[in-house]
Image: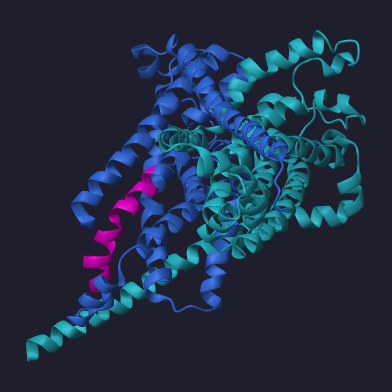
Chain colours: A cyan, B blue
Amino acid sequence: MMFQKVRNRKSNIEESVVKKILLIMALTSVLSLGLIAFFIFMEGLPFMFNYGITEFIFGTTWDPTNQVYGIFPMIVGSVLATILAIFIGAPIGIAVAVFLVEIAPPRVAKVIRPAVQLMEGIPSVVIGLFGMVIILDLIRRLSRGPLSEFLPSTYQTGYSVLAGAIILVIMILPTIISISADAIRAVPKEYKQAALALGSSQWQTIYRVVVPAAKSGLIAAVVLGVGRAIGETMAIIMVIGNTVLIPELGWESIFAPVRTLTGNIALEMGYAGPEHRQALFATGIILFMFIIIINSITIVLRKKEY
Amino acid sequence: MFNVKPNHMIKVKRSQRLAFTMLSLAALLTVIILFGILFYIMSQGFSVISMEFLFTEPRSMGTEGGVFSAILGTIYLVALVLLIATPVGVGTAVYLNEYMPAGRFKNIIRFSTELLAGIPSIVFGMFGFIFFVLMLGDYTGGFSILSGALTGVMMILPVIIRASEESLRSVPNTLKEASLALGTTRWYTIKKIVLPFALPGITTSIILSIGRVIGETAAFLLTLGGSLLVATSIFDGSRTLALHLYLVAMETGDLQMALGSGAVLIILIIIINFTAAGLFKLLVRRFST
């Protein structure tokens, strides 16, 4: 009797200690998020207010040596590369997902699924290096060859929005594919069976029933892709040229070298003086805002899924 | 309505054939891109890789010599990150899944984990730079493996939490209830029943997060310092293979040497993916059945 009581008390103490430790662990991620937000804003926000938010966001000159900090060219660069990447990547990604779930024979799906997984695992710098060696060369040949009459010489180096977007496509494809595939898989079988029973062909079922039913999941996949594209740093630095310039409007702009928000931070943080560093953290705030908005959309959209 | 024209059926069939061809082409393109990258990096990189490349230290900014210190840096960093992130990540998942009642507080933790997962690595890098490198520099050694590892922990926590939660959720309630009905405490049940059952899933997620650390560059660019020397403690600066690849390619322009590092990286990633898959099968057989 006695013995049992002691044992019970011991395990009760263990239970409550463990529970407390686990609670502290669970709070780590909340704390991390809080710390990150706090420090980025603490470093960047005062600078942004002192310098003037509009001048900072819409200023077109970035010249840290003369204390001029306008990040508009970087915003344009990030947005351009992301739009182009989504424009190419979203249809391909969703197509692969549809193929994978609805059409591919099991034996083919067995090859594609691990391939997509492996693609997600390739380090971004490796993709960037591949871009530096192969994609830059291809674009250079294109811009110096058949397109040379139409492009100014600064647009003929290969380093370009297009190169950045192609790299981004490679990086966001796995995300878009796997999340779209989940969304398509979640469409109730009855919907499909009903459509097929009405005499629709397999393809009609897919694009009239399955895809519309999976719509919110597919949008979530694309939005998540946007988030990854905007946040991508290393691979894109390696191919996009990093020139602080706003390309002129027109189709030629996809051959223009630009700099992204992320690239701005990664390239200059290492040697920045105090004020310059604050300007870079302010750049981080803008990036952070983009990401928070995009992620909130995704989280809301994914809650809507079945 | 019911007199379907034969013409119409042909059109339906034709558009289906066209659509399916396009979809298969998209899939084919994806696979070709993947294998194109793998094949190119490997074939170019293999001409650089040798015993000397793997086991000597880099000289002249990495254009000569090997990648030994970068390999060691990678191993140290991965080990330290996992040492911290595994207990915290799995602990969080256990707490969320086994202890915490549903409610607003739980939602807050879930939501911040998801937000954390979406933050770009360069933002982690900036934070690590200002917090671990500059502010806590006296304790972390400034640019150091420790600063990098703490930053890396924040990055992979959401990955481990999410995957662990998924495996914990797959533990049948009947098992838990049976154990609790025998009069065990909650923690005893978790220790003896829940965790062993979820072990395969958790292990796989941890191995896959190794890949994440190995492939990460932006966060470590701003926290590791990029030292070429072999690190002797966690307070020393260092560089990982991925960071080495980036610095060599961008600062020296020696793409051949960078391709060598790239090939080593890809081999590592492939090994990790296969180990994760193999170990999962093995552990499932051993623990979950």
Q: Is residue A70 left or right of residue B42?
A: right
Q: Give coordinates of residue B114: x percent, y percent.
A: 56, 59
Residue A265 in view of the camera: no
- Left-right relation of B202 to A269: left
Please tell me whether residue B9 belongs to the stretch shown in magenta: no
Name which residue lies at 92% across and 29% down: A248
Q: Which residues are magenta?
A: B187-207
Horizontal and vertical percent for residue B285?
A: 21, 50
Q: Residue at x 49, y 22 (%)?
A: B38
Q: Residue furthest bottom?
A: A1
Q: Residue A58: x and y, percent?
A: 90, 45
For residue A92, above or below residue B198: above
Q: In the displayed image of the protein, which residue is found farthest to the front?
A: B3
Which residue is painted at 55% across and 50% down in the image?
A: B132
Name the image quarter holding the C terminus of chain B: bottom left
Q: Quadrant of the N terminus of chain B?
A: bottom right
Nearer to us in this view, A175 or A63: A175
